[in-house]
Amino acid sequence: MNDNLNFKHQSFKPESATMGLISFLSTLPTLLPNAPLPLPSSRCPIRYGTNNCKIEDGGSNAVNGVPRREILKCFGAAISLELVASSSPIPSHFVEVANAADLIQRRQRSDYQSSIKTTLYLAIKANPELISPLLTLALNDVMTYDKPSKSGGPNGSIRFSAEINRPENQGLSAALSLVEEAKKEIDSYSKGGPISYSDLIQLAAQSALKATFLASAIRKCGGNEDKGNLLYSAYGSSGQWGLFDRQFGRSDTQEPDPEGRVLDWTKASVQEMKDKFIAIGFGPRQLAVMSAFLGPDQLATEAKLSTDPDVTKWVEKYQRSRETVSETDYEVDLITTLTKMSCLGQTINYEAYSYALPKVDFSRLKL
């Protein structure tokens, strides 16, 4: 049983193997040799004079639609980063070379994800009654994970009628419909292909959770939305979502997952819930913090969980935390648990949703 929620000793594969200093040379011409060169006594000697930058294009300020200023920024960044890499005291095998294409892909994925979150935020704001079903939808998609075979998990299988119509998924069809409608809109503006159901279902759970965190902050401010938003911005857990956001690039399965892997949370005993969480690598602590995912009435669920001595201490801990201004223990542990669960059995494609940009003709740029 692993109740430790600390990521410090976890090994999550980043988008590039080992992050070190960055060399910004992939789509740009090589400006400095890759091997470190001996530097003069003055590390960056200043040469006085005039540098003229001119693009001979009949007066246009852009090359293939890319502003000249942006091109110069790329060259400046390339030179600066190469100087840092070449003069670094860190041994070369610790210096990771991340090319310009990597940085562009990350920006594309980040912008795309921001647009997705806006779409989901508006959809959930218009349908607040679906917050609880969205959380359970995401959990039940995860809970098909089978640890021995490494099969199932958050792979979007719950979208199939054969799975969504199972008894344990009763009442989740409306939440799935919201996801499907959001997907149509998101796919309409995606430049890097359609979003997977597995990604979208987990992102919808994230948006639903944020809505509950914000609603709690507003209640603590007597219902004043402006003050509640300010409270959540100042003390909320927004900064804890970084690792969850990076796990973006899940793959969809093409068939339903096997039956019998997911409990009907409203009918299962606490012992059955504990056994299920243990089976996928979690424990009583994670069961307690995920109480909002286990049914429409979180307090009723927690009252049931509190009948078990292994779970009750965690339920009480998170209830106390929710009474504080920041809800730190509850929100951080919940985000951490969801982050772990949301990639069980998945191999994340860190290039998903990126797309090729028009090539810039650098031969037209004179320095």
Image (cartoon, helix red, strand yellow):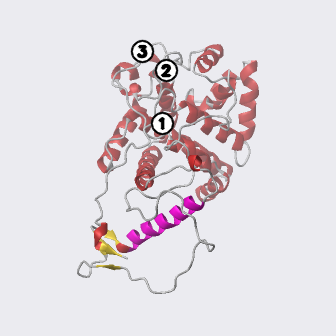
Q: Residue at x 44, y 86 (%)?
A: 50
As drawn, the label of residue 150 is: 2
Q: Circle 1: is it few (<14), some (14-19), or many (20+) Cα within 10 Å?
A: many
- Image side of residue 281 versus residue 78, left or right: right
**Region rendered in magenta:** 69-87
Tell me: residue 319, above or below residue 253: below
| Residue at the far bottom in the pictured view | 49
Q: CA distance from mark 1 to mark 3?
A: 20 Å
Badge 1 element? helix
Q: Amino acid at mark 1?
A: Gln
Q: Position of residue 117 (x, y in %)?
A: 45, 48
Q: Amino acid at mark 3?
A: Pro
- Classified by dominant secondary structure, the portion drawn in magenta counts as helix
Badge 2 element? loop
Q: Earlier in the sequence, mark 1 or mark 3?
A: 1
Give the quarter of the image for residue 212. top right
Look at the image and say whether residue 76 sits in the magenta stretch. yes
Look at the image and say whether residue 46 sits in the magenta stretch. no
Kindly identify which residue carries mark 3.
258
Q: CA distance from mark 2 to mark 1?
A: 19 Å
Q: Position of residue 314 (x, y in %)?
A: 73, 29
- Image side of residue 205 versus residue 367, left or right: right
Q: Earlier in the sequence, mark 2 or mark 3?
A: 2
